[in-house]
Amino acid sequence: MSHDQNGQGRPEALERMTFFSDAVIAIALTLLALELPVPVADGPRTLLRALTGAHGRQYLAFLLAFVLVGASWLAHHALFSYVAGSDDRLLVLNLVALFGSCSSPGPARPWAPPPPAAWAWRCSRP
């Protein structure tokens, strides 16, 4: 990485790192949502029943994981508002922090039961 006279990385490098971090968090949130079943409803009441019914624990696990990842993104955003430059150590520390952010939904997994065998059978049919 090229440095300026003060030994800090260029501001463009810091900007690239924050954009990369935002993209990683966005992808992590997208992958969380991909696991959700699509609720079938024809109005607000049936939507509420669909969200709290058979798949209610999956939606609760998604909400918990979303809050965990969102909180880590907010902390990351707040922290980097004070950073003026970057170096190789900051890049590595940022990757470690991103790994932690992407791993944080793991504790929410016990809330969501595995998909039923009938669902897996339907998805595996040609």
Image (tube, grey):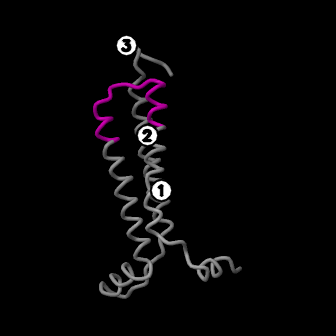
Q: Name the residue tied to disc 1.
A: 106
Q: Quadrant of the C terminus?
A: bottom right
Q: CA distance from mark 3 to mark 1?
A: 41 Å
Identify residue type, mark 3. Asn
**Residue identified by numbered label 2:** 97
Contact, mark 2 vs mark 1 (Cβ under 8 Å): no
Q: Nearer the viewer, mark 3 or mark 2?
A: 2
The magenta segment? 76-95
Whether residue 70 appears in magenta in the rendering, the answer is no
Residue 9 or residue 99, whichever sits in front: 99
Report the mark closest to the observer, 2 or 1.
1
Examine the image and state in which quarter residue 93 appears. top left
Residue 80 counted in the magenta span = yes
Residue sitting at 47 percent across and 56 percent down? Answer: 106
- 85 left or right of 34 in image: left
Q: Within 10 Å of the Cα at label 3, are there few (<14), some (14-19), or many (20+) other Cα atoms?
A: few
